[in-house]
Amino acid sequence: MKLLRPMSDKIKPTALGDTQDWDVLWAHASSGDMPAYEQMLSGLARIIRGFVRRRMDVADDQIEDIVQDVLMAVHHKRHTKRTETPCLAWVMGIARHKLLDFQRRAYKSRGRQQQIEHHIHELMVPPSQLADQAKQDLEVVMESLKPCEQDALLSVYVHGLSIKEEASRTGRSASATKVALHRSMSKLKNIWDQRS
């Protein structure tokens, strides 16, 4: 078993840069040395922040979100680091992946925003008109269900009957009523998804 050398005053967050220093700090942090763990996270945050800032032109709060995301990933994935892999290389690999994830999300979000702006006139509909349209859509979809399924859904989800009340009203057991409602909801969802 490899013994750790005691933490030296040479390893400070301001001096960290040498791969060997990071590996020693990682070993101490991994063995439960909380000051070493805090020192490591502090030093890593500074390096990751610079890494992100050089690669993206985003607001400081977004940079901090990415830094925190990377540090959380380092914490949660620390058991996956191999001893032969240098600590800093492993962390920067995680940082690259998190940065790519952020860029993908930003790209998708930008695309959705452009779609919304393109169709903004469709979204500017009075609430009463939306409610009427939703009611019509629901009626069309409900027509695809059997009358007993429609009745059960309306009784429980619209009129507020309990499962027990609906079961006694129809003469079914409570468990059979639950199963029927679940199947009706699944069928309704599938029909709705096909229409969308």
Image: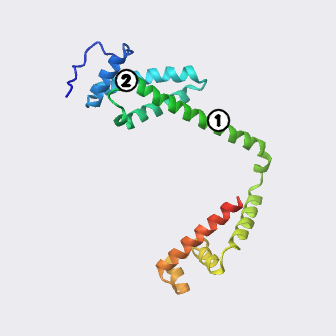
Please provide percent x and percent y for residue 136.
75, 67
* Residue 156 in the figure: left or right of residue 121: left
**Residue closest to the eye, 144 or 83:** 83
Task: Please state the total of marks drawn on the protein image.
Answer: 2
| Residue extending farthest right | 121
Identify the image quadrant of residue 118: top right
Residue type at mark 1? Tyr
**Residue closest to the eye, 96 or 174:** 96
Residue type at mark 2? Pro
Q: Which residue is mark 1?
A: 107
- Kindly tell me whether residue 163 is visible in this rendering: yes
**Residue closest to the eye, 42 or 196:** 196
| Residue extending farthest front | 84
Crowd class of label 2 (few under 14; some 14 to 19; many from 20; radius 10 Å): some
Where the N terminus falls, by quadrant?
Answer: top left
Q: Is residue 71 above or below residue 22?
A: below
* Residue 123 in the figure: left or right of residue 95: right
Chain-order first, disc 1 or disc 2: 2
Crowd class of label 1 (few under 14; some 14 to 19; many from 20; radius 10 Å): few
Q: Secondary structure at mark 2?
A: loop
Q: Which residue is mark 2?
A: 86
Q: Residue at x 73, y 69 (%)?
A: 140
